[in-house]
Amino acid sequence: MKNIAVFGAGYVGLTSAVIFANSGYNVTLIEISPSRLKKLEDGKSFFYESGVNELLAQALSAKNLSVTNNSEQALKNAEVVFSCVGTPDNPDGSSNLQYVFDVAESVIKQTQDNVIFVQKSTVPVGTGQKIEALFKKHSRKISYASNPEFLREGTAVQDSLWFDRVVVGSNNTTAANLVLDIYRNVEKNKLKLAKLAGVKPKRNTPSLYVKTSRNSAELTKVTANAFLALKISFANSIAKLADAAGADVVEVMDAVGSDRRIGRAFLNAGRGYGGGCFPKDVSGLISSAEDYGVDLPIMTATTDVNESMPGYIANKANNSLGELKDKRVAVLGLAFKAGTSDARKSPGVKLANILDKSGALVKAYDPHASQEAKQDLRSNIIISDSIQDAVKGADAVFVTVDWPEFKTLDFSWLKSKMKGNIFIDAVNAFEADELKSCGIEYIGVGRS
Ligand code: UDX
């Protein structure tokens, strides 16, 4: 089995395609956006992700990868088709499955018999059943496998090579085994691929290969993301209590997280979660549960807490700064987290907009995400092209992403550039004492 087609050159599709191609498969990547396609043909990804451009260049020059917008040509010889297209949220929070069904239609019309259709797009539980019914209706012999993706932006290549588990759910065992074999092959090649990509190998931990039913695999993906989002909102709820009671949420979570039953990961309080996954996966889970007549108040609360955080942080600043109107503030960080240019549902953008709405004069800076954030920022907000420009004359500085260039800031230098002395650490990544020793007042989240 050699020929793979991948639909969608987003974070998941492009990363998967370049990894499969450099593991010895012939991969055709189908992308319908002309601007993204043009960039790919020039050997460049449309997003910033460590190692992806290197793997792309290598796969294109070795001719293991081709990119096209012509699905008919791409599907002609495909033996396995990965669907990695977007499932954005509808205004009511449900998942928009238009692209997923478009791919299914192309597969029905354009593939050979016995092809395996692998669903990597995040879909509500029950979607695979509907697609299998479509295959049957058109009398097509196509096997369906759900293969949810767990890679994180910023560490996508490493996560794909050193994975905790690969989950494949299918009612066809042969198809499930063939899909798992692709990942076994990737795992065999991981050191070579890491070298090509220029990413650091991760600590070797056992990689699990998990076979489940189709529906269980679909539900696994959204459940994993929803649980991580729940952990973050739980930490943020405790942060508010820590602020009120005079405790430090970082100390609390360090101690609580050292219990191996709980774990320390995803208990970092701050401005809340954003990005292309958690917000839409939580709302998609709530909405799909409703379709099955199941209420998930725990997830509604997760969303509510998350949405409250940027406003909560702006309020904390207000307590120290007084009226925000006409205050000069710098927001450092527009990406939804460090390591990516992705600014979708970015908490830093939300915070900048809240500050602007309160009448503050906002300058924002991000080393990689300014362009992507621009469309979501209110028109008064000035995007700076350097930290220095953003913080010059500021009454307060908000850090909303723990980019390395922010974490290594020289605080004496910072103080000399600012007019005021308020530093709001919306990611709890700094030490209050270090800032205080430079004459800066530190405000964290849950660190009173
Ligand atoms: C997530 C999942 O981790 C990944 O497995 C899935 O495939 C896609 O969704 P991603 O969205 O890339 O990945 O980012 P992640 O690192 O999980 O962070 C999500 C958001 O939560 C970010 O805004 C991050 O800053 C925030 N976060 C994370 C916190 O606020 N606190 C934490 O403790 C951890």
Image (tube, rainbow, N blue to C red):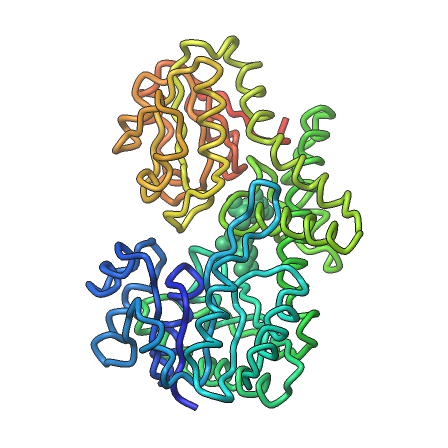
Looking at the image, the residue that sits furthest to the front is 138
Q: Nearer the viewer, residue 23 or 447?
A: 23
The residue shown at (38%, 16%) is: 361
Residue 339 location (% of width, % of height): 40, 51
Q: Is residue 125 above or below residue 433?
A: below
Q: Nearer the viewer, residue 277 or 78?
A: 78
Q: Is residue 270 above or below residue 151?
A: above
The quarter of the image holding the N terminus is: bottom left
As drawn, is 15 to the left or to the right of 315?
A: left
The residue shown at (57%, 86%) is: 175
Q: Is residue 185 above or below residue 132?
A: below
Residue 238 location (% of width, % of height): 71, 36
As drawn, is 75 to the left or to the right of 274?
A: left
Residue 133 location (% of width, % of height): 63, 74
The residue shown at (47%, 31%) is: 434
**Residue 207 in sight here:** no
Kindly indicate the quadrant of the structure image that contains residue 273.
Answer: top right
The quarter of the image holding the C terminus is: top right
**Residue 119 in sight here:** yes
Kindly indicate the quadrant of the structure image that contains residue 6.
Answer: bottom left
Residue 289 location (% of width, % of height): 73, 53
